[in-house]
Image (cartoon, helix red, strand yellow):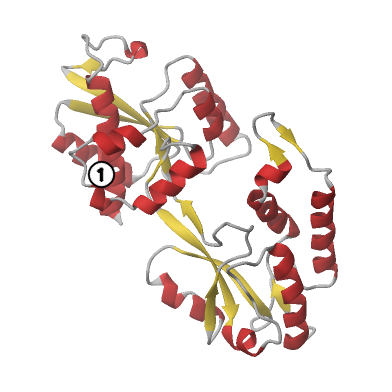
Amino acid sequence: MMKKKLWTMFICLMMIATTACSSGGSGEEKNQGKPVKSDGKTVLTLTILQPDEFYQTVKKKFEEKYPEIDLQIISYKQQAGEEWTVGDFEKYQKTTNTALLSGKGADIIEIGGLPLKEYISKQFLLNMEDLLEQDSTLNKSELQTNVLEAAKKAHGGLYAMPSGFYLEAFVGDGDILANASVKADDKNWGWKEFGEISRTLKQQAGESGFALAGTPPERILYETVFDHFEQFVDSAAKKANFDSPSFVETMQQLKKWYDEKVMTANQAEAGKQLFYNTYFYSPADLIHIPHQFFSNPKLLQKPHAEGQNGVTITPSFEFAI
């Protein structure tokens, strides 16, 4: 895992180094895209949210490989594990926005939680797609190309490089599903179909059980809107359509499921839940985690829109140039 994360950071750093050094000139005016010199070295800056030993390892390894470069790491928080209080992240976002608008932003930014689409529309960020394809020094076998393709599809280009990723998983009770009178077609079900199937399964499992617990209705509403984003939001016009009949119907369905206790925001007792949302961070999790829930677990795709995949890949950290 450390090797993969180091390689990701190396890619970003090498790309910005190549871009800076190919711009020519004496390298004194950073705002003109030229490298800044410090004791004969090219200075590259990396901004992060919080200090971490990993970044110090990145700095050490990178500067050993490229001694002509001085990598300067700037952290918003000064200490590892420092608590974030109310308003801290808004201040960080405002500081970053101001720096980018003034042309004084860092060379590489930890982009998680920042308005990536807005930065892309204002052309603040570099599309790394072409550089990645052209750079013969990179070992592309070290990359998870399917994750990069998903990032390119989501943002219209490779504007953010994930340092790692994890999978959002959906696990069901295999015994109940095998004996159920209704078929759980997880490859094609949306939240509407899931709700109807869950009602039937709950009746078979007993009135005291839940199909899904520990999940507030607003979470499922978020999933539904995300899956049908273009139906509810016009990104180009920056308008939302949350008073449409389909959205109202979605809200009514959610209320009905929770009123009937098919689902609940509260935690359920052991053995009183038919499905679980969970996350896989390593290959071993595929074996260990599902069996924490059921003796005969079944891996499923979570409810999703037609034409989409029900397995969500989530980046752990993302970096932009």
Q: Is residue 79 visible?
A: no
State the image quarter where residue 91 is shown: top right
Q: Residue at x 24, y 52 (%)?
A: 141
Q: Is residue 223 visible?
A: yes
**As drawn, 35 above or below 226:** above
Q: Residue at x 41, y 47 (%)?
A: 149
Query: Toward the viewer: 154 or 284?
Result: 154
Q: Determine crowd level at label 1: few under 14, some 14-19, many 20+ residues with C-alpha closer than 10 A.
A: few
Q: Position of residue 139 (x, y in %)?
A: 21, 46
> In screen coordinates, is 271 left or right of 318?
right
Q: Position of residue 318 (x, y in %)?
A: 43, 42
State the image quarter where residue 294 is shown: bottom right
Q: Quadrant of the C terminus?
A: top left
Q: Position of residue 209 (x, y in %)?
A: 74, 81
**As drawn, 150 above or below 62:** below
- As helix, strand or loop, the secondary structure at mark 1 comes to helix
Amino acid at dot 1: Thr
Query: Toward the viewer: 156 or 30?
Result: 156
Q: Residue at x 22, y 9 (%)?
A: 25
> In screen coordinates, is 157 left or right of 9?
right
Q: Position of residue 16 (x, y in %)?
A: 29, 28
Q: How many marks?
A: 1
**As drawn, 119 above or below 138:** above
Q: Which residue is mark 1?
A: 57
**As drawn, 154 above or below 72:** below
Q: Quadrant of the N terminus?
A: bottom left
